[in-house]
Image (cartoon, rainbow, N blue to C red):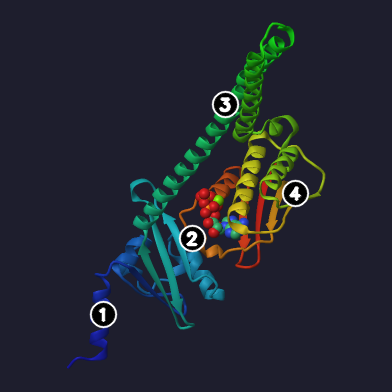
Amino acid sequence: MVTREKVAMEVFKLLDIVSDGILILDNQVKILYLNKVAAFFLGIDQEKALDQEFLKLAIDPQISGLVHNYKSDKSTSSIEIHVGEGEKQSWIELKIYGKDEYVIVCFRDISARKEGEEKYKMAYESIRFLNSHSQKIKEEERTLLSREIHDQLGQRLTGMKMEVDFILKKSSNLDDFAKEKLQGVLKQIERTVSTIRNISRSLRPGILDDFGLLAALEWQAEEFKKTVQIPVFFQYGGKEKPIENQKATAIFRVFQECLTNIMRHSQCSHVKVEIDFGPMALKLMIVDNGSGFDTKILNNTKSLGILGMKERAESFGGSFDIQSSPGDGTKTILTMPY
Ligand SMILES: Nc1ncnc2c1ncn2[C@@H]1O[C@H](COP(=O)(O)OP(=O)(O)OP(=O)(O)O)[C@@H](O)[C@H]1O
Ligand SMILES: [Mg+2]
Protein backbone atom coordinates (compact mmCIF):
# COMPACT_ATOMS: atom_id res chain seq x y z
CA MET A 1 0.00 0.00 0.00
CA VAL A 2 1.22 3.47 -0.87
CA THR A 3 1.82 5.54 2.23
CA ARG A 4 2.23 9.27 2.58
CA GLU A 5 5.89 8.67 3.58
CA LYS A 6 6.55 6.60 0.44
CA VAL A 7 5.11 9.36 -1.75
CA ALA A 8 7.22 11.91 0.10
CA MET A 9 10.34 9.81 -0.58
CA GLU A 10 9.47 9.64 -4.29
CA VAL A 11 8.97 13.40 -4.36
CA PHE A 12 12.38 13.91 -2.74
CA LYS A 13 13.94 11.67 -5.44
CA LEU A 14 12.20 13.71 -8.11
CA LEU A 15 13.63 16.90 -6.63
CA ASP A 16 17.08 15.54 -7.51
CA ILE A 17 16.39 15.81 -11.22
CA VAL A 18 14.91 19.33 -11.35
CA SER A 19 17.17 22.14 -12.52
CA ASP A 20 16.59 24.41 -9.48
CA GLY A 21 18.34 23.89 -6.18
CA ILE A 22 16.24 23.25 -3.06
CA LEU A 23 17.42 23.42 0.53
CA ILE A 24 15.19 22.84 3.57
CA LEU A 25 16.32 23.88 7.06
CA ASP A 26 14.62 23.19 10.39
CA ASN A 27 13.96 25.76 13.10
CA GLN A 28 17.50 25.21 14.48
CA VAL A 29 18.83 26.02 10.96
CA LYS A 30 19.99 22.41 10.52
CA ILE A 31 19.79 20.85 7.08
CA LEU A 32 16.70 18.66 6.73
CA TYR A 33 17.03 18.18 3.00
CA LEU A 34 18.98 19.45 -0.01
CA ASN A 35 18.81 18.28 -3.60
CA LYS A 36 21.81 17.67 -5.91
CA VAL A 37 21.67 21.12 -7.50
CA ALA A 38 21.58 22.90 -4.11
CA ALA A 39 24.58 20.82 -2.96
CA PHE A 40 26.41 21.82 -6.13
CA PHE A 41 25.68 25.55 -5.67
CA LEU A 42 26.72 25.37 -2.01
CA GLY A 43 29.84 23.34 -2.80
CA ILE A 44 29.02 20.68 -0.20
CA ASP A 45 28.37 16.92 -0.15
CA GLN A 46 24.67 16.10 -0.40
CA GLU A 47 24.77 13.08 1.94
CA LYS A 48 27.23 14.40 4.52
CA ALA A 49 25.46 17.76 4.79
CA LEU A 50 22.25 16.30 6.26
CA ASP A 51 21.66 17.37 9.89
CA GLN A 52 24.62 19.78 9.78
CA GLU A 53 24.20 23.27 11.20
CA PHE A 54 23.85 25.33 8.04
CA LEU A 55 25.36 28.56 9.34
CA LYS A 56 28.50 26.71 10.50
CA LEU A 57 29.30 25.27 7.05
CA ALA A 58 31.97 26.83 4.86
CA ILE A 59 29.65 28.32 2.26
CA ASP A 60 29.39 31.59 0.39
CA PRO A 61 28.82 34.34 3.03
CA GLN A 62 26.17 35.96 0.78
CA ILE A 63 24.05 32.80 1.10
CA SER A 64 24.55 32.31 4.83
CA GLY A 65 23.92 36.05 5.30
CA LEU A 66 20.57 35.78 3.51
CA VAL A 67 19.49 32.85 5.71
CA HIS A 68 20.74 34.55 8.86
CA ASN A 69 18.86 37.80 8.09
CA TYR A 70 15.71 35.93 7.13
CA LYS A 71 15.77 33.99 10.37
CA SER A 72 16.22 37.11 12.48
CA ASP A 73 13.79 39.55 10.85
CA LYS A 74 12.38 37.95 7.64
CA SER A 75 13.61 41.08 5.82
CA THR A 76 15.24 39.94 2.59
CA SER A 77 13.49 37.15 0.79
CA SER A 78 15.20 37.25 -2.59
CA ILE A 79 18.69 38.15 -3.86
CA GLU A 80 20.83 37.68 -6.96
CA ILE A 81 24.44 36.78 -6.24
CA HIS A 82 27.56 36.36 -8.29
CA VAL A 83 29.69 33.32 -7.38
CA GLY A 84 32.91 31.70 -8.58
CA GLU A 85 35.65 33.03 -10.82
CA GLY A 86 36.82 32.66 -14.44
CA GLU A 87 35.17 29.77 -16.30
CA LYS A 88 33.32 28.69 -13.16
CA GLN A 89 31.61 31.97 -12.36
CA SER A 90 27.85 32.15 -12.42
CA TRP A 91 24.86 34.16 -11.27
CA ILE A 92 22.38 32.58 -8.88
CA GLU A 93 18.98 33.82 -7.83
CA LEU A 94 18.07 32.85 -4.28
CA LYS A 95 14.53 32.88 -2.95
CA ILE A 96 13.73 32.14 0.63
CA TYR A 97 10.38 31.09 2.10
CA GLY A 98 9.19 29.62 5.32
CA LYS A 99 7.80 29.95 8.78
CA ASP A 100 9.28 29.57 12.24
CA GLU A 101 9.51 25.75 12.03
CA TYR A 102 11.37 25.57 8.72
CA VAL A 103 13.00 27.59 5.98
CA ILE A 104 13.15 26.69 2.28
CA VAL A 105 15.80 28.19 0.04
CA CYS A 106 15.49 27.87 -3.77
CA PHE A 107 18.49 28.37 -6.05
CA ARG A 108 18.19 29.16 -9.75
CA ASP A 109 21.05 29.60 -12.21
CA ILE A 110 20.36 32.93 -13.95
CA SER A 111 23.74 33.26 -15.71
CA ALA A 112 22.20 33.18 -19.20
CA ARG A 113 19.74 35.96 -18.32
CA LYS A 114 22.48 38.04 -16.69
CA GLU A 115 24.75 37.56 -19.70
CA GLY A 116 21.92 38.75 -21.98
CA GLU A 117 21.30 41.76 -19.74
CA GLU A 118 25.01 42.58 -19.73
CA LYS A 119 25.20 42.37 -23.53
CA TYR A 120 22.09 44.56 -23.82
CA LYS A 121 23.59 47.10 -21.40
CA MET A 122 26.86 47.21 -23.33
CA ALA A 123 25.07 47.60 -26.67
CA TYR A 124 22.92 50.38 -25.19
CA GLU A 125 25.98 52.15 -23.78
CA SER A 126 27.70 51.93 -27.20
CA ILE A 127 24.66 53.45 -28.91
CA ARG A 128 24.55 56.26 -26.36
CA PHE A 129 28.25 56.91 -26.79
CA LEU A 130 27.90 56.91 -30.56
CA ASN A 131 24.95 59.29 -30.36
CA SER A 132 26.71 61.76 -28.09
CA HIS A 133 29.86 61.54 -30.23
CA SER A 134 27.91 62.26 -33.41
CA GLN A 135 26.11 65.16 -31.68
CA LYS A 136 29.49 66.61 -30.76
CA ILE A 137 30.79 66.29 -34.32
CA LYS A 138 27.56 67.75 -35.69
CA GLU A 139 27.90 70.79 -33.40
CA GLU A 140 31.53 71.28 -34.40
CA GLU A 141 30.62 71.11 -38.09
CA ARG A 142 27.69 73.48 -37.60
CA THR A 143 29.94 75.99 -35.81
CA LEU A 144 32.56 75.80 -38.56
CA LEU A 145 30.01 76.04 -41.36
CA SER A 146 28.19 78.89 -39.68
CA ARG A 147 31.44 80.88 -39.32
CA GLU A 148 32.59 80.14 -42.87
CA ILE A 149 29.25 81.22 -44.32
CA HIS A 150 29.12 84.32 -42.15
CA ASP A 151 32.74 85.39 -42.56
CA GLN A 152 33.70 84.28 -46.08
CA LEU A 153 30.45 84.76 -48.00
CA GLY A 154 29.39 87.71 -45.87
CA GLN A 155 32.67 89.55 -46.41
CA ARG A 156 32.69 88.90 -50.16
CA LEU A 157 29.15 90.19 -50.51
CA THR A 158 29.95 93.27 -48.45
CA GLY A 159 32.91 93.86 -50.82
CA MET A 160 30.62 93.53 -53.86
CA LYS A 161 28.10 95.90 -52.32
CA MET A 162 30.80 98.52 -51.76
CA GLU A 163 31.99 98.16 -55.37
CA VAL A 164 28.48 98.66 -56.78
CA ASP A 165 27.92 101.57 -54.40
CA PHE A 166 31.17 103.09 -55.59
CA ILE A 167 30.20 102.75 -59.28
CA LEU A 168 26.81 104.32 -58.59
CA LYS A 169 28.29 107.28 -56.73
CA LYS A 170 31.40 107.96 -58.82
CA SER A 171 30.38 107.18 -62.43
CA SER A 172 28.81 110.28 -63.86
CA ASN A 173 28.24 108.85 -67.35
CA LEU A 174 25.81 106.03 -66.34
CA ASP A 175 22.48 106.12 -68.15
CA ASP A 176 19.20 105.57 -66.26
CA PHE A 177 18.90 101.94 -67.39
CA ALA A 178 22.35 101.04 -66.02
CA LYS A 179 21.64 102.93 -62.78
CA GLU A 180 18.35 101.09 -62.30
CA LYS A 181 20.02 97.74 -62.95
CA LEU A 182 22.82 98.49 -60.48
CA GLN A 183 20.27 99.55 -57.82
CA GLY A 184 18.60 96.18 -58.40
CA VAL A 185 21.91 94.36 -57.95
CA LEU A 186 22.47 96.29 -54.73
CA LYS A 187 19.08 95.20 -53.36
CA GLN A 188 19.76 91.58 -54.29
CA ILE A 189 23.12 91.70 -52.54
CA GLU A 190 21.45 93.10 -49.39
CA ARG A 191 18.80 90.37 -49.48
CA THR A 192 21.49 87.71 -49.94
CA VAL A 193 23.47 89.12 -46.99
CA SER A 194 20.38 88.87 -44.80
CA THR A 195 19.65 85.29 -45.99
CA ILE A 196 23.23 84.29 -45.27
CA ARG A 197 23.02 85.80 -41.79
CA ASN A 198 19.86 83.77 -41.13
CA ILE A 199 21.38 80.53 -42.42
CA SER A 200 24.49 81.11 -40.35
CA ARG A 201 22.43 81.84 -37.21
CA SER A 202 20.18 78.85 -37.70
CA LEU A 203 23.25 76.61 -37.91
CA ARG A 204 24.65 78.09 -34.71
CA PRO A 205 23.84 81.48 -33.27
CA GLY A 206 27.08 83.41 -32.83
CA ILE A 207 25.48 85.04 -29.79
CA LEU A 208 25.97 81.74 -27.91
CA ASP A 209 29.76 81.95 -28.34
CA ASP A 210 30.02 85.74 -28.12
CA PHE A 211 27.60 86.62 -25.31
CA GLY A 212 26.90 83.32 -23.55
CA LEU A 213 23.97 81.05 -22.81
CA LEU A 214 21.50 83.49 -21.23
CA ALA A 215 21.79 85.97 -24.11
CA ALA A 216 21.34 83.11 -26.60
CA LEU A 217 18.24 81.79 -24.80
CA GLU A 218 16.68 85.25 -24.72
CA TRP A 219 17.52 85.82 -28.36
CA GLN A 220 15.92 82.47 -29.30
CA ALA A 221 12.81 83.36 -27.29
CA GLU A 222 12.61 86.71 -29.08
CA GLU A 223 12.82 84.94 -32.47
CA PHE A 224 10.05 82.57 -31.32
CA LYS A 225 7.90 85.53 -30.27
CA LYS A 226 8.42 87.20 -33.66
CA THR A 227 7.39 84.02 -35.50
CA VAL A 228 4.35 82.90 -33.49
CA GLN A 229 3.34 85.99 -31.49
CA ILE A 230 3.46 84.06 -28.20
CA PRO A 231 5.20 85.96 -25.37
CA VAL A 232 7.96 84.28 -23.38
CA PHE A 233 8.56 85.47 -19.79
CA PHE A 234 11.93 84.88 -18.15
CA GLN A 235 12.60 84.50 -14.45
CA TYR A 236 16.03 84.04 -12.90
CA GLY A 237 17.17 82.56 -9.60
CA GLY A 238 20.61 82.35 -7.99
CA LYS A 239 23.86 83.95 -9.08
CA GLU A 240 24.93 83.29 -12.65
CA LYS A 241 27.70 80.68 -12.91
CA PRO A 242 29.90 79.91 -15.92
CA ILE A 243 28.98 76.81 -17.86
CA GLU A 244 31.23 74.90 -20.21
CA ASN A 245 30.66 75.47 -23.95
CA GLN A 246 29.45 71.96 -24.86
CA LYS A 247 26.98 71.90 -21.98
CA ALA A 248 25.74 75.39 -22.88
CA THR A 249 25.18 74.15 -26.44
CA ALA A 250 23.23 71.14 -25.16
CA ILE A 251 21.01 73.40 -22.99
CA PHE A 252 20.46 75.74 -25.91
CA ARG A 253 19.48 72.87 -28.25
CA VAL A 254 17.03 71.48 -25.68
CA PHE A 255 15.51 74.95 -25.35
CA GLN A 256 15.17 75.23 -29.14
CA GLU A 257 13.52 71.81 -29.36
CA CYS A 258 11.10 72.71 -26.55
CA LEU A 259 10.07 75.91 -28.29
CA THR A 260 9.59 73.98 -31.53
CA ASN A 261 7.32 71.53 -29.70
CA ILE A 262 5.38 74.39 -28.12
CA MET A 263 4.99 76.01 -31.54
CA ARG A 264 3.87 72.75 -33.19
CA HIS A 265 1.74 71.08 -30.55
CA SER A 266 0.71 73.30 -27.62
CA GLN A 267 -1.61 76.09 -28.86
CA CYS A 268 -0.65 78.02 -25.74
CA SER A 269 -0.99 81.76 -25.09
CA HIS A 270 2.25 82.26 -23.16
CA VAL A 271 5.44 80.51 -22.11
CA LYS A 272 7.33 80.88 -18.81
CA VAL A 273 11.02 80.14 -18.60
CA GLU A 274 12.74 79.78 -15.24
CA ILE A 275 16.51 79.60 -15.01
CA ASP A 276 17.92 78.73 -11.63
CA PHE A 277 21.64 78.66 -10.84
CA GLY A 278 21.74 76.13 -8.02
CA PRO A 279 24.89 75.22 -6.07
CA MET A 280 25.72 72.16 -8.22
CA ALA A 281 23.60 72.45 -11.34
CA LEU A 282 21.70 74.80 -13.58
CA LYS A 283 17.98 74.14 -13.73
CA LEU A 284 15.97 75.23 -16.75
CA MET A 285 12.20 75.03 -16.58
CA ILE A 286 9.98 75.73 -19.58
CA VAL A 287 6.26 75.90 -18.89
CA ASP A 288 3.49 76.44 -21.42
CA ASN A 289 -0.21 76.86 -20.70
CA GLY A 290 -1.31 74.96 -23.79
CA SER A 291 -3.17 71.74 -24.58
CA GLY A 292 -0.82 69.40 -22.71
CA PHE A 293 -0.70 65.69 -23.57
CA ASP A 294 -0.73 62.26 -22.03
CA THR A 295 2.93 61.43 -21.40
CA LYS A 296 2.12 57.70 -21.79
CA ILE A 297 2.29 58.27 -25.57
CA LEU A 298 6.05 58.73 -25.19
CA ASN A 299 6.46 55.00 -24.49
CA ASN A 300 5.33 53.98 -27.94
CA THR A 301 5.77 57.06 -30.10
CA LYS A 302 8.34 57.11 -32.87
CA SER A 303 8.96 60.84 -32.46
CA LEU A 304 12.53 61.56 -31.55
CA GLY A 305 12.46 65.11 -30.18
CA ILE A 306 11.89 64.29 -26.52
CA LEU A 307 14.11 61.22 -26.66
CA GLY A 308 16.91 63.36 -28.14
CA MET A 309 16.55 66.00 -25.40
CA LYS A 310 16.75 63.33 -22.70
CA GLU A 311 19.82 61.77 -24.30
CA ARG A 312 21.53 65.17 -24.63
CA ALA A 313 20.95 65.97 -20.95
CA GLU A 314 22.02 62.54 -19.71
CA SER A 315 25.16 62.42 -21.86
CA PHE A 316 26.46 65.36 -19.77
CA GLY A 317 25.37 63.86 -16.45
CA GLY A 318 22.20 65.95 -16.36
CA SER A 319 18.54 64.99 -16.25
CA PHE A 320 15.45 65.72 -18.29
CA ASP A 321 11.84 65.40 -17.28
CA ILE A 322 8.61 66.30 -19.00
CA GLN A 323 5.37 66.66 -17.03
CA SER A 324 2.08 67.08 -18.82
CA SER A 325 -1.54 66.04 -18.87
CA PRO A 326 -4.31 66.87 -21.35
CA GLY A 327 -5.68 70.36 -20.78
CA ASP A 328 -3.02 71.23 -18.22
CA GLY A 329 -0.09 72.57 -20.23
CA THR A 330 3.40 71.13 -20.33
CA LYS A 331 6.38 71.59 -18.02
CA THR A 332 9.87 70.59 -19.09
CA ILE A 333 12.67 70.46 -16.54
CA LEU A 334 16.30 70.17 -17.49
CA THR A 335 19.11 70.02 -14.95
CA MET A 336 22.71 70.29 -16.03
CA PRO A 337 25.64 70.02 -13.63
CA TYR A 338 28.27 72.78 -14.02
N1 LIG B 1 4.54 71.47 -25.38
C1 LIG B 1 3.77 70.49 -25.82
N2 LIG B 1 2.42 70.61 -25.83
C2 LIG B 1 1.60 69.61 -26.25
N3 LIG B 1 2.07 68.42 -26.69
C3 LIG B 1 3.39 68.22 -26.73
C4 LIG B 1 4.31 69.24 -26.30
N4 LIG B 1 5.57 68.74 -26.43
C5 LIG B 1 5.44 67.50 -26.91
N5 LIG B 1 4.14 67.18 -27.11
C6 LIG B 1 3.60 65.87 -27.55
O1 LIG B 1 4.63 64.91 -27.41
C7 LIG B 1 4.87 64.27 -28.66
C8 LIG B 1 6.31 63.89 -28.78
O2 LIG B 1 7.14 65.03 -28.92
P1 LIG B 1 8.51 64.90 -29.72
O3 LIG B 1 9.21 66.21 -29.69
O4 LIG B 1 9.23 63.72 -29.16
O5 LIG B 1 8.07 64.51 -31.18
P2 LIG B 1 7.42 65.37 -32.32
O6 LIG B 1 7.50 66.82 -31.99
O7 LIG B 1 6.05 64.81 -32.60
O8 LIG B 1 8.33 65.01 -33.58
P3 LIG B 1 9.89 65.34 -33.75
O9 LIG B 1 10.56 64.00 -33.70
O10 LIG B 1 9.97 66.01 -35.07
O11 LIG B 1 10.29 66.23 -32.63
C9 LIG B 1 4.37 65.24 -29.69
O12 LIG B 1 3.99 64.58 -30.88
C10 LIG B 1 3.18 65.88 -28.99
O13 LIG B 1 2.05 65.06 -29.10
MG1 LIG C 1 9.41 67.64 -31.34
**Label 1: which residue?**
11
Q: Amino acid at mark 4?
A: Ile
Can you tell which of label 4 and label 1 is closer to the viewer?
Answer: 4
Q: Which mark is residue 299?
A: 2
Q: Earlier in the sequence, mark 1 or mark 2?
A: 1
Do labels 1 and 2 touch, CB within 8 Å? no
Using the numbered discs, state the Cα–Cα distance from disc 4 to disc 1 in whole angstroms.
Answer: 67 Å
Q: Amino acid at mark 3?
A: Leu
Using the numbered discs, state the Cα–Cα distance from disc 3 to disc 2 in whole angstroms.
Answer: 36 Å
**Label 3: which residue?**
145
Q: Earlier in the sequence, mark 3 or mark 1?
A: 1
Q: Quadrant of the N terminus?
A: bottom left
Q: Nearer the viewer, residue 309 or 126?
A: 309
Q: Residues within 10 Å of mark 4 (few under 14, many from 20)?
A: some
Q: Residues within 10 Å of mark 1 (few under 14, many from 20)?
A: few
Q: Nearer the viewer, residue 94 or 335?
A: 335
**Height in image: 42 above or below 12?**
above
What residue appears at the point 37 percent right and 72 percent down from the top-left corner?
Answer: 23
- Which image quadrant shows ligand 1? bottom right
Disc 2 element: helix
Quarter of the figure with residue 172: top right
Total marks shown come to 4
Do labels 3 and 4 touch, CB within 8 Å? no
Disc 4 element: strand
- Give x and y (percent) for residue 268: 67, 59
What residue appears at the point 23 percent right and 80 percent down from the top-left corner?
Answer: 10
Q: Amino acid at mark 2?
A: Asn
- Give x and y (percent) for residue 224: 68, 46
Q: Which mark is residue 275?
A: 4
Can you tell which of label 3 and label 2 is closer to the viewer?
Answer: 3
Q: Give the residue furthest to the right.
A: 239
Q: Earlier in the sequence, mark 3 or mark 4?
A: 3
